[in-house]
Image: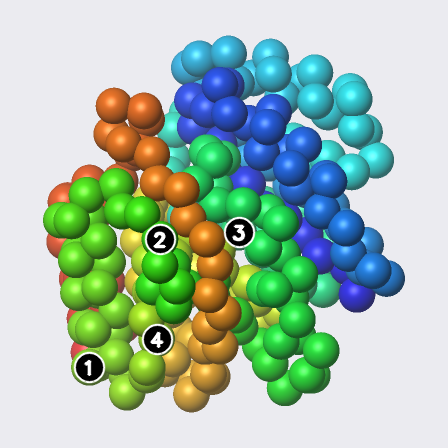
C-alpha cells in the first residue's frame, strides 16, 4: 500500500518545516509514502520554505501552488490531481495533529472493507483551544448523526483518511473549511461507515494562528443540511 499525505498550507512558514519533517519520520512497515503540499496563496515566507523543502526531499515531496488563497477544500481538490497513493490522509500544516498517529489511523485499512477512518479527538482526553470551539465541534457531530443516522464523535477532525478512489468519486465542490461536512455528508449518504480511532490533539489559539471561526461553523451546519436535503 502507498499513502498520500495531503497538506493544504496558508501562511504557515513557522510550522510547515516541522510538520513535513514529522510526516517523513513516521515509520510504516511495507507502506510507501508521498507528501503533496498545496501552497494556497500564502503571503508570508511559506513559498520560500517550501522551495527549500522540495529541494531537500525531491522524491518524497510534491509542491503545488495556488496564485491566490482559495481555501482548504480547493487545496485538497487540487492535491487530489497529483495523488498517486492508495490511501489519502489529510494533514493540517500547523502542529495540532501528530503524524505519529498514522499507524493507528491506517490499521483499520488492513480490512479491505474499510473505506474511511476519522481520528477522533473525543475518544480520549485532550486539551481544548476553547470551550466554544469544543462544543461547536460536538454540535456538528450531533447534527451529522441526527441527519444521517451515524454515530461519529468528531465530524470536524483534521485527520480524515480515505481510500483514494472513493475520495475522487465524491465530486467534491467545497472551497473552504466546509470540506469536512461535505465529505462526511457524501460518504454517509452512500451508506459507508466512518470508522473512528482515538488520537491526541494539541490545539493552538487564535493568537497563535488558528483560522477557523464561528462563521465556518455556520457554513458547516448548512453544508450538512444541504447534502441531506
Give how far apart the Cα atoms at labels 4 and 3 are: 18 Å
* Residue 21 shown left or right of residue 18 in the figure: right
Residue 59 in sight: yes
SS assignment at label 3: strand
Considering every residue shown, the one lying at the far front of the view is 125
Q: Where is residue 16, by image quadrant?
A: top right
In front: mark 1 or mark 4? Answer: 4
Give how far apart the Cα atoms at labels 2 and 4 are: 17 Å
Q: Position of residue 81 (x, y in %)?
A: 63, 49
Q: Which residue is mark 3?
A: 90
Q: Which residue is mark 2?
A: 126
Give how far apart the Cα atoms at labels 2 and 3 are: 20 Å
Give how far apart the Cα atoms at labels 3 and 1 are: 25 Å
The numbered mark at residue 215 is none
SS assignment at label 1: helix
Residue found at x 32% / y 83%: 150
Q: Which residue is mark 4?
A: 152
Residue found at x 45% / y 77%: 194
Residue 161 vs residue 23, the one in the foreground? 23
Q: Which residue is mark 1?
A: 146
Residue 97 vs residue 171, the one in the foreground? 97
In front: mark 1 or mark 2? Answer: 2
Do labels 1 and 4 touch, CB within 8 Å?
A: no
For residue 114, above or below residue 83 = below
The quarter of the picture where the N terminus appears is bottom right
For residue 205, above or below residue 89 = above
In front: mark 4 or mark 3? Answer: 4
SS assignment at label 4: loop
Give how far apart the Cα atoms at labels 1 and 2 are: 25 Å
Amino acid at each position: 500500500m502507498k499513502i498520500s499525505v495531503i497538506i493544504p498550507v496558508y501562511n504557515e512558514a513557522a510550522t510547515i518545516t516541522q510538520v513535513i519533517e514529522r510526516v517523513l519520520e513516521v515509520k510504516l512497515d511495507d507502506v510507501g509514502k508521498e507528501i503533496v503540499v498545496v501552497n494556497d496563496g500564502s503571503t508570508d515566507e511559506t513559498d520560500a520554505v517550501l522551495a527549500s523543502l522540495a529541494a531537500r526531499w525531491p522524491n518524497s515531496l510534491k509542491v503545488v501552488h495556488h496564485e491566490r488563497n482559495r481555501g482548504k477544500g480547493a487545496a485538497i481538490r487540487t492535491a487530489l490531481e497529483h495523488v498517486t497513493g492508495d490511501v489519502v490522509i489529510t494533514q493540517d500544516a500547523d502542529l495540532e495533529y501528530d503524524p505519529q498517529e498514522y499507524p493507528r489511523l491506517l490499521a483499520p485499512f488492513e480490512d479491505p472493507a474499510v473505506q474511511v477512518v476519522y481520528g477522533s479527538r473525543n475518544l480520549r482526553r485532550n486539551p481544548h483551544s476553547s470551550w466554544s470551539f469544543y462544543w461547536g465541534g460536538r454540535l456538528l457531530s450531533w447534527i451529522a448523526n441526527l441527519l444521517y443516522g451515524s454515530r461519529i464523535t468528531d465530524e470536524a477532525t483534521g485527520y480524515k483518511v480515505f481510500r483514494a478512489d472513493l475520495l475522487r468519486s465524491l465530486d467534491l465542490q467545497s472551497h473552504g473549511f466546509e470540506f469536512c461536512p461535505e465529505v462526511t455528508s457524501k460518504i454517509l449518504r452512500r451508506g459507508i461507515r466512518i470508522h473512528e480511532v482515538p488520537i491526541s490533539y494539541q490545539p493552538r489559539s487564535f493568537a497563535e494562528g488558528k483560522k477557523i471561526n464561528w462563521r465556518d461553523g455556520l457554513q458547516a451546519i448548512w453544508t450538512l443540511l444541504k447534502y441531506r436535503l
